[in-house]
Image (spheres, grey):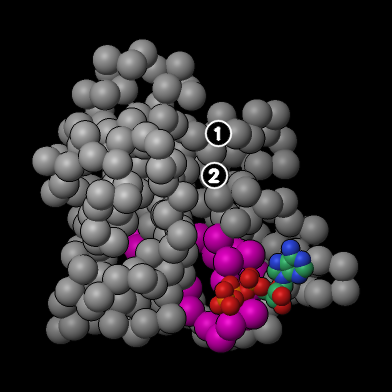
Amino acid sequence: MSVVELRDVTREHGQVHALKGVSLEVSAGELVAVMGPSGSGKSTLLNLAGGLDRPTSGVVTIEGEDLSRVKDLAALRRGHVGYVFQDLNLIPSLTAAENVMLPRELDGVRAGRARAEALAVLAEVGVEEIAGRFPEELSGGQRQRVAIARALVGERRLLLADEPTGALDTATGDEILELLRARCDAGAAVLLVTHEPRYAAWADRVTYLRDGLVAESSAVRLESAR
Ligand SMILES: Nc1ncnc2c1ncn2[C@@H]1O[C@H](COP(=O)(O)OP(=O)(O)OP(=O)(O)O)[C@@H](O)[C@H]1O
């Protein structure tokens, strides 16, 4: 079953037709890379897929629920969707563990349990030892891992990543992709925006956008690239 589905989705910003009718489905266990030139609509697509923005027309469903009919979209997002952005958005005054706990606490999970979950997911992404440190005390790679831990916590099955490797060196970028791939193989659905063929090679499918339309969608899984 698809975790996220977009059916003939358009998005207009005034005169700008950012998306002109895009359909895309990502199932559990699938990693789909979205590529395309600057301005082709990649971030718009990701924002629509995660319910951060609403389409001008067309339908977006997450776990089978039509987002236009969902009353509490913020709660649905916290429950099902994890976001990893290039500019991380970690809260500087909170430790790594506290940053990861935050979405769970917003959902009413008690602090003790939220902390245990945060430590478990920080361990999963290989940075449990920095749980008590603040973002400014961490390297770029460590910060990105914390951001991914925050996106994964609470068993969210849909993971949306917009250039998550943008600020990282190649070796660290590869490690981040390995993490996303592992989550995917464990049953998550991952939508990854990237400019880098190197990272798109980890995907099951690559969708190319051009001028707000899907120019090409290829089911190439490049085993040899890993
Ligand atoms: N809030 C907005 N208001 C007006 N125009 C917008 C808005 N958001 C996006 N656009 C326009 O929609 C089009 C698609 O933008 P989008 O950010 O989705 O592209 P992108 O492929 O992610 O680009 P990049 O690779 O540069 O991040 C662009 O022409 C952009 O200028």
Reading the image, the residue beneath label 1 is 76
Q: Secondary structure at mark 2?
A: strand
Q: Residue at x 47, y 22 (%)?
A: 107
Task: Judge whether residue 41 is colored magenta.
Answer: yes
Q: Secondary structure at mark 1?
A: helix
Q: Position of residue 202 (x, y in %)?
A: 27, 72
* Residue 210, quarter of the rendered image: bottom right
Q: Position of residue 124 (x, y in %)?
A: 16, 44
Reading the image, the residue beneath label 2 is 62
164 vs 183, nearest the viewer: 164
Q: Amino acid at mark 2?
A: Ile
Mark nearer the N terminus (1 vs 2): 2
Residue 202 visible in the snapshot = no
Up-down: is 212 above or below 150?
below
Q: Which quadrant of the picture is home to ligand 1?
A: bottom right
Q: Any atom of ligand 1 within 8 Å of the CB at mark 1?
A: no
Residue 54 visible in the snapshot = yes
Q: Residue at x 67, y 33 (%)?
A: 70
Whether the residues at callouts 1 and 2 have beta carbons within 8 Å, the answer is yes
Q: Does 161 sit left or right of 171 as displayed?
A: right
Up-down: is 24 above or below 110?
below
How far separated are the C-alphas under marks 1 and 2?
A: 9 Å
Q: Quadrant of the C terminus?
A: bottom left
Q: Which stretch appears magenta?
A: 22-46
Q: Residue at x 48, y 24 (%)?
A: 106
Q: Amino acid at mark 1?
A: Leu
